[in-house]
């Protein structure tokens, strides 16, 4: 179980980190998807990019302090539930919404694996 936890967490760190930094720097390919979902460009830096990046930092810290990793993974799950919901409400079923769904599933798996690998934390 520990190997699965590490693998999922490292993949989540890579994808969530890319997603957070892309929002922070207003990466051009994400702008049309955000606009079609009705997300203001001013929200890319805060709260969107900041929350994703802090969640990623939490996953990294969670490699040494499992309670922080659980909290970070849970926070990222809530974030991506809201992100996917926003795209669905806007009837925006673009690739960006699908990427959000992928990140939601990845962070759900990371949360489950983190809890399974560290059952005494809860």
Image (tube, grey):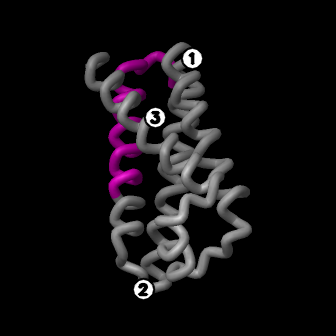
User: Residue 93 at x, y = what percent?
Assistant: 36, 78
Q: Residue at x 42, y 81 (%)?
A: 92
Mark 2 or mark 3: which comes first in sequence? 3
**Residues at discs 2 and 3 in contact (Cβ within 8 Å):** no
Q: Give the secondary structure at mark 2.
A: loop
Q: Give the secondary structure at mark 1.
A: loop
Q: Nearer the viewer, residue 104 or 37?
A: 37
Separation of marks 1 and 3 at Cα, in angstroms: 15 Å
Q: Give the secondary structure at mark 3.
A: helix
- Return the mark for residue 97: none
Mark 1 or mark 3: which comes first in sequence? 3
User: Residue 44 at x, y = what percent?
Assistant: 65, 62
Q: Is residue 81 above or below residue 24?
A: below
- Give, as a single range, the part of the protein colored magenta: 102-122
Q: Residue at x 67, y 75 (%)?
A: 40
Prevalent SS, magenta region:
helix
Mark 2 or mark 1: which comes first in sequence? 1
- Return the mark for residue 13: 3
Q: Is residue 119 above or below residue 52?
A: above
The residue labelled by disc 1 is 65
Which of labels 2 and 1 is toward the front?
2
Quadrant of the drawing holding the N terminus: top left
Q: Nearer the viewer, residue 43 or 113?
A: 43
- Return the mark for residue 91: 2
**Residues at discs 2 and 1 in contact (Cβ within 8 Å):** no
Q: Mark yes or no: residue 74 visible.
A: yes
């Amino acid at each position: 179980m520990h190997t699965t936890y590490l693998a999922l967490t490292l993949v989540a760190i890579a994808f969530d980190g890319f997603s957070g930094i892309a929002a922070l720097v207003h990466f051009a390919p994400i702008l049309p998807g955000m606009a079609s979902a009705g997300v203001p460009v001013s929200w890319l830096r805060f709260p969107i990019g900041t929350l994703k990046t802090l969640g990623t930092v939490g996953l990294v810290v969670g490699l040494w302090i499992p309670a922080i990793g659980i909290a970070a993974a849970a926070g990222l799950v809530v974030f991506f539930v809201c992100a996917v919901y926003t795209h669905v409400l806007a009837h925006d079923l673009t690739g960006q919404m699908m990427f959000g769904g992928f990140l939601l599933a990845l962070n759900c798996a990371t949360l489950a694996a983190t809890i399974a690998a560290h059952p005494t934390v809860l």
